[in-house]
Image (cartoon, rainbow, N blue to C red):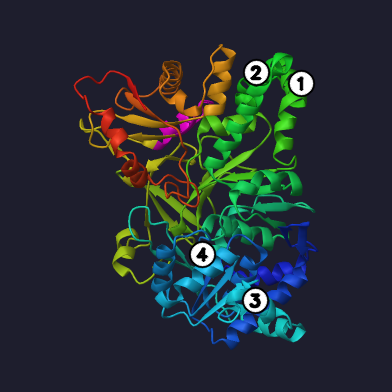
Amino acid sequence: MEYPSLNELFLDAIDHRPNPKAQMYRTADGWKSISSPEMLRRVAGLSKALAELGIKTGDRVGLFAPNCPEWHIADFAITGLGAASVPIYFNESPDRFVYIMNDAGPRVILTAGEPEARKAAEARERMPKVEHLICVAPPADLRGEILDYDSLIASAGDADVAEYRRRCALVKSNQLATLIYTSGTTGEPKGVMLTHANLSSNSIESLRSHVVQPGDLGLEFLPLSHVYERTVGYGYLSKGVTIAYVENIESVGQALQEVHPTMAAAVPRLFEKIYGGIIEKGRREHGMKRKIFDWALRVAHDSVPWRAYNQTPSAGLKMRWSVADKLVFSKIRAGLGGRLRTFVSGGAPLSPALAEFFWSVGIPVYQGYGLTETSPVVTSNRPDDHKVGTVGRPIPTVQVRIADDGEILVKGTCVMQGYFGKPEATKAVISPDGWLATGDIGRLDADGYLIITDRKKELIKTAGGKYVAPAPIENSLKTSPYILNAIVVGDQRKFCSVLVVLNAPVAQMEAKNQGREFASPSQMLTDSWVRDLLSGEIERLTANLAQYEKPKRFAVLEQDFTTANGELTHTLKMRRRIIEERYKDVIAKLYADVEDPRPQVHS
């Protein structure tokens, strides 16, 4: 099948699914919107301005902005010229920003937001290939050296739209559409070359069975610089779904309550935080309200075979669920905006227990799998074909097979052209017959659903030669209400250990219920009651593991991992090497007495 260019997808939606609120964005005065005809006018105006600056087929343009309407406007303006966008995470460090720009070689960089504009301006002398900077609402003191986006598009009219359509018709689906740089957690970032067909085929096929209804609204809060949210966004726009842009993940809760989305894509860390918030809020209740909440959680647990796995429920269970839904579950859904119909999880494996919880309270979560090099979706659960605990079956035009060592191999229209300027790195992951080695370990079940085990490079090999997959253990531990985060360590050690981040507010509430008080969260880290509480949770949640997989010791951390200190990627995945280096002294204490590997605790 021949897939259209991204610009053809965009124009088809403009012509056949016009939307008076194609894009929504939050201001100090509330949410405002841009219609699809106005969006097209802005795209055409910016595309004309870029052409006048000399941008042509084969060129690259940097895109350095948080999620906002201008992000997609710039993307379509760039690709409409046959050029390729180079998106950069809006909070990227100056050094990585400069490295990516010098590697990709864009002639123009478009920014939005004062911090981004200043970062680009300050770095300009270190980027000799950059000829122009364009900024949405540039700071007053930089207007002399930065072109003003609003001025460039102000006079765009029908003639510019017609010219944009003409240019778009010349863009072929096999042309390069973007360079997306990998997070670089294990080395310098590499530019993944994705074509129009890579992205359009992925967007079309991964969303094909998701039903779109009038008034649907998609919330975009994961960085658009990442291929996951970006491909989802193409799907929204192509189907006439309104996009509400959220600049940072901290504002998601507020946005859910204000715009009431029907569709959203998220990563497991967000689901973990939502679950933790639900448990924390419920445990703040007292008396009858607390008893009702605890009872509803038991009903949710009993409902998993029915709600998550389609087994026939008893009449009594259906009645209990209906009551629990009225009293508790409906309020949980209301906290997420009350209208979510399609909630997609990707970026990393989601704990089966967590997925079961959301399904049991009436929030369907469709888990998928992919990576930047596959545009990104490889497999996906869909409304008409899903199995909880898996990442779904391969989407159309994509093939999956498992190598002898368990590595997942992928072939199809989603696979990248290669790494920009790195032919040897490309050959290392793509075989001569087109199979991409993903670096992930997994298996296909009897029904063809894919189950992810872990990253190949993140497998822990104990001193005894046993391989341990840390992610499933960590995901299980994070279902405890008292554990905010966890990272398993122990490579080349005699046994595994785990660093856990204490969920202090929930632990404090439980302590108070038992007549204990703590002056501060720091005091909790060394308290024997807290250590016993966590030890019991770790033992409970790892009871089904092999002995060599069970963490023998643990240390308690007071602060969670963050993107700001480099411990998380911008899609909230742990940077293991950085975390292990930061806490190397803590880890060393866990193994200071390896002759006595009985369960111990440290802080």
Up the image or down, 388 lies above or below 118; here it is: above
Count of marks, rendered view? 4
**Which of the marked residues, 3 or 4, is nearer the chain's N terminus?**
3
Q: Is residue 333 visible?
A: yes
Q: Is residue 481 magenta?
A: yes
Q: Nearer the viewer, mark 1 or mark 2?
A: 2
Q: Which mark is residue 323?
A: 1
Q: Which mark is residue 198?
A: 4
Q: Is residue 312 visible?
A: no
The residue under label 2 is 294
Q: Residues within 10 Å of mark 2 (few under 14, many from 20)?
A: some
For mark 4, give the secondary structure: helix
Q: Quadrant of residue 11?
A: bottom right
In magenta, the rendered stretch is: 471-485
Q: Nearer the viewer, mark 3 or mark 4?
A: 3
**Which amino acid, by three-letter code, is at mark 4?**
Asn
**Which amino acid, by three-letter code, is at mark 1?**
Val
The residue under label 3 is 149
Left or right of residue 154: residue 382: left
